[in-house]
Amino acid sequence: EAPSEPRSGRSAALRARMEERLLGARFRYLNQQLYTGSSQDAARLFRADPAAFHLYHRGFERQVRRWPERPVQRIVRYLRRRPASLVVADFGCGDCTLAASVKNKVHCFDLVPLSPRVTVCDMAKVPLVAESVDVAVFCLALMGTNLQEILGEANRVLKLGGTLMVAEVASRFEDTHAFLKAMTQLGFRTVSKDLSSSYFYVLEFAKTGPARPGPAPGLRLRPCLYKRR
Ligand code: SAH
């Protein structure tokens, strides 16, 4: 800070800095809650406090802006290579960047509407009939601890042979091999995996049939906790 800065300017700058810190702390706290609770807990949290959701999204935007590429752009590129007639479901759509970037019909699901396109619901229970979509997308959205239930819902709404796209933070994968093996039990065959980025993985699956019940022990992702900066 310039020593000649007037006192009022200095205190405004100090206040802005403290507000930033507070927002950062609240973001990290909310983020931790989302990754350590079930999707139903997340739904309750944001229903009770929609302001928390907007704060979460500001924090999320700030994090992702630092990355060399936004994962959602990878999904956009993927969809543009495939027929625009494919029907898509975007689980945890955020600001609906995906729907706004492709010609496909995209069903957008999130807990609070950041855009009028959003259907508000818990991603573990979306208002779509069984086997009605061609592509299901989870882009940085596999947050709840009830992963099996969430991916089971994607399986339910996907047509046989339909595509499941997952983009997730690389450091969340404890054991990628075990994760992919568990996915076969959930009725998904691995079509391609791009593990080349140190920021995020992009996995493409095809639905082989309904999810088989019973535990899928390899289906684990570490919470994505952001460090204080
Ligand atoms: N896919 C978007 C947003 C990722 S942030 C993108 O890539 O830009 C993760 C999103 O998942 C957030 O918008 C969050 O609100 C949403 N989400 C988390 N838990 C959810 C749940 N149980 N049901 C629906 N959406 C959920």
Image: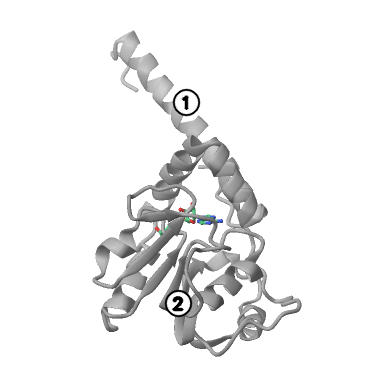
Label 2 CB-ligand 1 distance < 8 A: no
At mark 2, the secondary structure is loop
Q: What residue lies at 60% left-to-right and 70% top-to-bottom?
A: 173
- Which of the numbered marks, if any, corresponds to residue 18? 1
At mark 1, the secondary structure is helix
Residue 2 against residue 87 in the figure, above or below: above
List the residue tagged with mark 2.
196
Q: Which residue is nearer to you in this view: 153 or 199?
A: 153
Sequence-wise, the earlier of marks 1 and 2 is 1
Q: Amino acid at mark 1?
A: Met
The N terminus: image quadrant: top left
Residue 25 lies in quadrant:
top right
Number of marks present in the image shown:
2
Q: Is residue 20 left or right of residue 46?
A: left
Farthest residue to the top: give it: 7
Q: Which residue is nearer to you in this view: 105 or 56?
A: 105
Residue 81 spot, x, y in % from top left: 27, 82
Question: Is label 1 in contact with label 2 (beta carbons under 8 Å)?
Answer: no
Q: Is residue 198 visible?
A: no
Q: Which residue is nearer to you in this view: 198 or 140?
A: 140
Residue 11 against residue 95 in the figure, above or below: above
Crowding around mark 2 (Cα neighbors within 10 Å: few <14, some 14 to 19, many 20+) is few
Residue 9 spot, x, y in % from top left: 31, 15
Q: What residue lies at 46% left-to-right and 39% top-to-bottom?
A: 55
Residue 41 spot, x, y in % from top left: 64, 49
Crowding around mark 1 (Cα neighbors within 10 Å: few <14, some 14 to 19, many 20+) is few
Q: Is residue 214 left or right of residue 14?
A: right
Residue 114 against residue 85 in the figure, above or below: above
Q: Which residue is nearer to you in this view: 61 or 41?
A: 41
Q: Amino acid at mark 2?
A: Ser
Q: Is residue 82 visible?
A: yes
